[in-house]
Image (spheres, grey):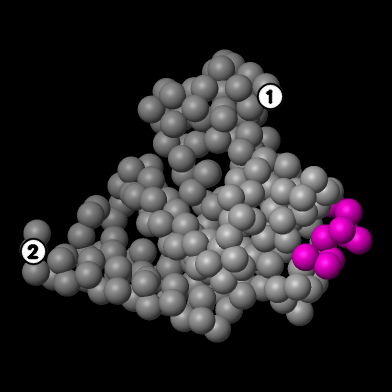
Amino acid sequence: MKPLNFGVLIAFIAISLMFAWLAFSFGGEDFNVYYAAARVTLQGGNPYDYSQLTPEIISVSEINNPYYYAPWFTWFVLPLGLLPYNVARSLWAIINVLLWFLGLINLGKLIPWPKAGWKRWAAYTLVTILFAWTTWGFEQVGVLIFFLLTTASLAIEREKLVTAGIFLALLLFKPNITVLPVAAILAWLILRKKWKPVLATTV
């Protein structure tokens, strides 16, 4: 690898980790709701019942929001509810950083421009600062959506159609954001008579 390419790659990784640390240190808003939903579910309660959710939220944070996510997102965060809040929050941050890097790897396979080198790493640094940092800071699910979308798109490109359907369905864990992109992708697949991902998503 050329020195410039290597140097910008290292800078991208270092800057990404620095901004992730800053977001974790000074941010924090939505994870308390995911954590509270997991705790309520583990206790046999209903995370969509605000009266059950509120005591768990205020036990760890002053920010008190309702829970609007699909059940399979709740199942995803259930293991975090078994951990102390600060440990769970740290793990959530680590997961989000890893998903961001994996999503960027997927994106590089989908859109091979600019080619791997300093221009790509510089572009990735920019989107990390503009998008990922804000998402990390508010502990939102934008990075998870990005990862699922790029994984589904890559599966479609590689003709792994059942896998694509599964990831498209998983994307609907936040339907107010993802229902239109998923519907558009499914319509595109139907027009091309590719029914497997459509059926997999439906099931």
Identify the mark nearer the N-term, 1 or 2. Answer: 2
| Percent of width and height locating residue 7 | 17, 72
The magenta-colored residue range is 48-56
Q: What residue is shown at x 23% (from left), y 66% (from top)?
A: 9
Q: Spatial distance from mark 1 to mark 2, Cα to Cα?
A: 47 Å
Q: What residue is shown at x 23% (from left), y 54% (from top)?
A: 116
Q: Amino acid at mark 2?
A: Lys
Q: Would you say residue 190 sits in the magenta stretch?
A: no
Taking the image as shown, residue 56 lies to the left or right of residue 162, namely right
Count residues near mark 1 (Cα–Cα under 10 Å), then give few for <14, some for 14-19, many for 20+: few
Query: 193 above or below 143?
Result: above
Q: Amino acid at mark 1?
A: Thr
Count residues near mark 2 (Cα–Cα under 10 Å), then give few for <14, some for 14-19, many for 20+: few
Which quadrant, please, contains the C terminus? top right
| Percent of width and height locating residue 128 | 43, 68
| Residue on which disc 2 sits | 2
Among all residues in the image, which is located at the extreme right? Answer: 51
Regarding residue 114, the answer to whether it shows in the image is yes
Regarding residue 100, the answer to whether it shows in the image is no
Q: What residue is shown at x 57% (from left), y 23% (from top)?
A: 197
Which quadrant, please, contains the N terminus? bottom left
| Percent of width and height locating residue 57 | 76, 68
Q: Label for residue 202?
A: 1
